[in-house]
Image: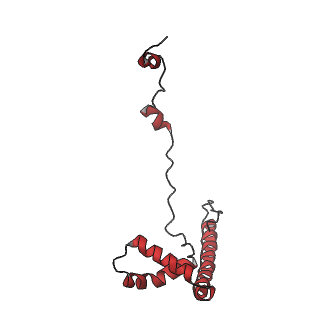
Amino acid sequence: MLCHISTLYANETRPTQRKAADKAEKTPRGKAKKDPKAPKRALSAYMFFSQDWRERVKGENPDAGFGEIGKLLGARWKELDDEEKKPYMEQAARDKERAEKEKKDYDNKKNDSGSGEADDDDED
C-alpha cells in the first residue's frame, strides 16, 4: 500500500512553540557586575614580553594586522630560551605577589565593610 508522503506527516503532531509568557517567567542570567575597585589580576610572563616587544614587531612589520602581530610575538616567545625569558618570569612573579596582596587587602576591606559577600574563589 503506497500512500502520499503528505498524508503520513499530516497526522504527526508538531511540538508547540514557546510563548512570550513562558519566556517572561524565566529569570535573566546576565553577568554579575564587576566591582570597579577590585584589584587587577596578575599578568603572565608572556604578557610582559608582549608589552615589551609589540612596538618593535610593529616597526619591523608595519603592514601586519593585530592577529598577525600576535602570531609573530608568539613565535618569538617560543624561540626564546629560559635565560632570555628569565626577566619576564621575574616580572610576572613580582606582579603575582602584588596581585595576591591587593586581593587579600581588598577581601579584608570588603569583609570589614560589613557586606558579608566575600568572594572566596580564586580566579588564577
* Direction right: furthest residue: 120
* Direction front: furthest residue: 1
Q: Quadrant of the C terminus?
A: bottom right
Relative side of 24 to 83, left or right: left
Structure colour scheme? secondary structure
- Count of all numbered marks drawn on residues in the image: 0
Where residue 108 appears, as percent x and y from the top left, is 64, 70
Q: What residue sits 64% from the left and 66% below the top?
A: 122
Relative side of 36 to 118, left or right: left
Please identify the quarter of the rendering in which residue 5 is found.
top left
Where residue 55 appears, as percent x and y from the top left, is 41, 83
Between 123 and 80, the one nearer to me in the picture: 80
Where residue 34 appears, as percent x and y from the top left, is 51, 62
Where residue 111 appears, as percent x and y from the top left, is 63, 66
Q: What residue sits 58% from the left and 88% below the top?
A: 84
* Direction left: furthest residue: 63
Q: What residue sits 48% from the left and 21% below the top?
A: 13
Please identify the quarter of the rendering in which residue 85 is found.
bottom right
Between 78 and 124, the one nearer to me in the picture: 78
* Vertical comparison of 33 with 8: above or below: below
